[in-house]
Amino acid sequence: MFKYTIKRVLLMVPTLFGAACLVFFLLRMIPGDVCELRMAGEGGYVDEDAIKTCQHDLGMDRPKFVQFVDFITGFAVFDLGESMWTGKAITHELGLRFQLSLQIAIMATLVAVIIAIPLGTISAIRQDTWLDYAVRTFSIAGIAIPSFWLGIMIILGLLISTQAWFGEPWMPPIEYVSPLEDPISNMVQLIWPAVATGYRYSAVATRMTRSALLEVLREDYVRTARAKGLLERIIINRHALKNSMLPVITVIGIEFAFLMGGLVVTEQVFNLNGVGKLFVESVQNHDYTMTQALVMLVATVFVITNFVVDLFYAWLDPRIRYS
Amino acid sequence: MKPSIKLAIAMGAGAAFTLGAVATASAAPKRGGMLNIVVGSKIPSYDGHRETTFGMIHPIRPFYSLLIRVNPDNPQSTSDFVCDICSNFTKSSDGKTYVFKIRENVKFHDGTPLTSQDVKATWHKLIFPPKGIASSRKAFYGMVESVEATGKYEVTFKLKYATGGFIPALATPFNFIYSKKDLDTHGYKWHMKNINGTGAFTFVQHQPGAFVEGKRYANYHLKGEDGKNKPYLDGYKAISAPKMAIRLQAIRGDRAQIEFRAFPPKARDDLKKALGDKITVQESDWNCVMGFSSNQKLKKFQDVRTRQALTLGLDRWGGSKYLSKIAIVKTVGGTVFPNHSLAAKKEELLKLKGYNPDMAANQAEAKKLLAAAGMAGASVELLNRAVDQPYKVVGTWMLGQWKKLGLKTTQIVLPTGPWYAKFRKKKDQETMIDFNCQGVVNPLIDASKWLSNDIASNNYANYQDRQLDKWYDQMNRTGDEAEAYSIMRKYEKRIVDEKAHYAVSFWWYKINPYRSYVKGWNIAPSHYLNQSLDQVWLDK
C-alpha cells in the first residue's frame, strides 16, 4: 500500500506541470489584456500612457518565458501572487470564495447522497416496477434539466409564490454570510443552490447506484447467499450495496471536485461569490494571474480527489493494492 | 448654509429635462437606514484617477468629495455645477484664471483637515502625473497651465486659453480629492488599495466580488435640509451582481433598492407590472452615443461613397421607434448630446445624410453610391461586442438595414476583451459597432473622439483629417458660444455626412426603476454622475 501511495503521489507532479503549461500559454493566446479592459473598457477617452503604465506595473512587458518561470516558481512555493485586476493577494481573494464554494459542494453532495443511494437501491431491487420507472423518470429529469434553469425557476417561484401568499415578494439573500456568523441566514441563502445542484448531481449517482447494484445482485455470491437462506435485507445491505459502491464513489468524487470550480452558472444565477464566479470574472477580465491560480487550484483538487478515490479503491478492493 | 453656488459657464445653457422623472425631494428627508445598491460591474482598484469603470464609481464615489460636482438636485442640466469642497469661485475677465475658495470645515476620514495643499496635490496628480503614474483623463486638462495653492484655503487654476470645456471637466466624478499627507507618505499608488476621503460615507469593508460597505461620516461637510450634517443614510452596501436578472430580481425581492446604471424597457415593465407603485421609474437620455465606424485602412472603405451609402441605409427614425421598446437606445441625434446647447436642432439634423425620414429616397441614393464605388452587392462584416444591451440589438438591426441595400452582411460577435483588442489593433476589422460614453456632458471634450487617429486613440475608423483637428481646436479656444455652435455644426457635418467618418445611430437611453421608498436621488445623463449618495434617504 505504501509503494502504491508513493507512486500515485509522484504521478501528480507531471500532471500539474502539464496543466500549468497549458493554462499559461493558452491564456496569452486570447487577444486583449487586462489593462486595455481597465483603461478603455467603457468606451470613453483612452489614455495610451495609462495603458502602458498599467502593463509595466503588472509586468506584462517582460518576456513570456520570465513570466512563466515566475508563475511556476511561485506556484511551487504556494505564492500565487496578486490579482492583476484588483491588485489584492490571490490567496486572500480565493480564501473568501473557497469557503462558500466548499460549503455549497458539501451541501450539494449531502443532498445528492441522501437522494441517490436510497432511490438507486429501491430502483434496483424493484426493477421494472412502477417504483423503478418513477425513480428513473425523476433521475433522467435531473440530468436533463440544467441546474441554472432550475435555479432561475426556484428564484422566480419564490418571488411569485411569496407575493401571492404574503403580498410582498421574497427571495434568498444575495450576499454571503458565514455559517459561523449567522447560520440561519447562511442556510436560507445556500439551501436553494444546494438543492438545484444536488438534484442534478443525485440524478447521475442514482442511475449509477441502480446499475451497479443490479450488476452485483446477479453475482454468484449473492445467489449463494440467497440459497443459504439469508434475509434479503442483509444480502442487500451487507453484501451487495457495499460491493456496488465503487463506481458510485468514483462519480461522487469526480462530481465533488467539479463542484469546487464548476458551479459557474449556478453561482451566477444565485449571485454566489464562489470560485466559479471568480473563474468567469477572471477570464473576462484577462486576469492572467488569477485565472492561472484558479486553474491550478481546480487541477490540484481534481488530482487530490482522484488520489483519494484511488486509495479508497485500494482499501475496498485488495486486488488493486496487490496488483 | 446650503452650498448651491451655481456656476455659470460659457457653453452651458442646455435645457434640462427628464422624461418620466419624478420629483424625489418633495417630503422632508428622514434619517437612518441602509441603502442596498446592486452593481453590475467589478471594482479594479479604488483609485478614481486611474480607473474608468462605473464598477468602481458606484461603490467608491460616496467615500470621496470633488472640487465641484454636477448639482445633485438638478443633474439633468448640462450647465448646473455646484461647489463640493469649495465654497465659491471666481473667474477672471479673460476667462483664463479661476480662483476656488476651499471650505474650512472639511476633514478627511482619518481626521486630517483639508486645505488647499490637498487640492493642489490632487490636481497635480491628475493633470501632471509623474512618470509611471497612470492618470486616465489627464488629456481633459490640456487647457490647464498651472494649479497653485494661493492661500491656506484658496486654489488658483491658470489656463492656457479660455474654454467652456474647463468647468465641466473639473466636475468629472473620478476626480476624487486625496490627502497630500497620504500622497507624500504612502506614494501615488496607495489609493489603489486604500481609501481615505472626505465623502459622505466612511469605508467599512470590501469583500472582493461580494460587496463594499460604507457607514455615515458624522463630520461630513454638507448640511441637510434639517440643518444637520448629511448624509441621511446610516450606511450603504454596494452589492456586486454581474447578471442583470439577479439585479432585477434583487429589486423585486427588496434585497436591493436600486441599480444606478440602467435596465432595458422590458425589465422596467416587468417590475412595474409586479410591484405597481412600489416601483418608481426615472428615465433620461444618456451621454453614450452608439454608431458604427468603417476602417479606412481597408481599401473598400477608403471611398467616401461607400461610407455614405452605409449611413444612408440606416432608418434612424423608424429604428428609434421600435428599438426603444426593446433596447436601451432611443433618441436620434448627431455627435453632441441631444439636450446640450451645442447639439444640432432637428431641422439641422434632417439636412444631414441618413437623417431624412424618406427611407426610399435614402436607399435609392445609397444604392447609387454603392454602384458608383463598385460595392454593389459587396460583403460587409460588422464587428460587435458580445453584450446584448444595446450592442447586439443595434448591431443586428444595422445588418438588416444594410441587407436592404443589397449588401451581404456578416456579424462577428466577440467578448469584450478580444473585441477591444481587435479594435485597437486597427488592422483587419471592416465596420464595427463603435460608441462614445462619457460622464459629465461636455461636448468640447467628448467630441475629441473624432479627431485624427494620431491624436485620438479611440478613433477606431483610422483616418486622419486635419480639417477636423483645426476646427476642434478653434471650438475649444473660443469663449463665444455662438461661434462654438457654428464650428460644431461644420465639425459634425464633416464627420457624419461629407466624409462619413462615423455614423451616429442613436443615443442611449437610461431607465432606472427602483423601490419607491428611495428618495432624493435624481437621474443624471450618465451612470457615472450623481453617485455621492449624500442626498439620498429612505422613506420608511
Image (cartoon, grey):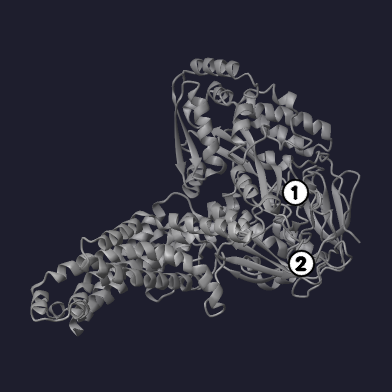
Mark 1 residue type: Ala
Chain letter belonging to callout 2: B
The mark found on residue B198 in the picture is 2
Identify whether B286 is placed above or below B363. Answer: below
The mark found on residue B344 in the picture is none
Q: Helix, strand or loop at disc 2? A: loop
Q: Which residue is mark 1?
A: B169
Asked if residue B499 shows in the view, the reply is yes
Residue displayed at 83% across by 35% down = B481
Identify whether A191 is placed above or below A9. Answer: above
The percent coordinates of residue B397 (x first, y second) are: 53, 32
A104 with respect to B527 (left or right): left
Q: Quadrant of the C terminus of chain A?
A: bottom left
B365 with respect to A251 (left or right): right
The percent coordinates of residue A29 (x first, y second) are: 39, 52
The percent coordinates of residue B517 (x first, y second) are: 73, 58
How far apart are labels 1 and 2 at the CA level?
20 Å
Choose between B169 and A115: the one closer to the eye: A115
Chain letter belonging to callout 1: B
Q: Earlier in the sequence, mark 1 or mark 2?
A: 1
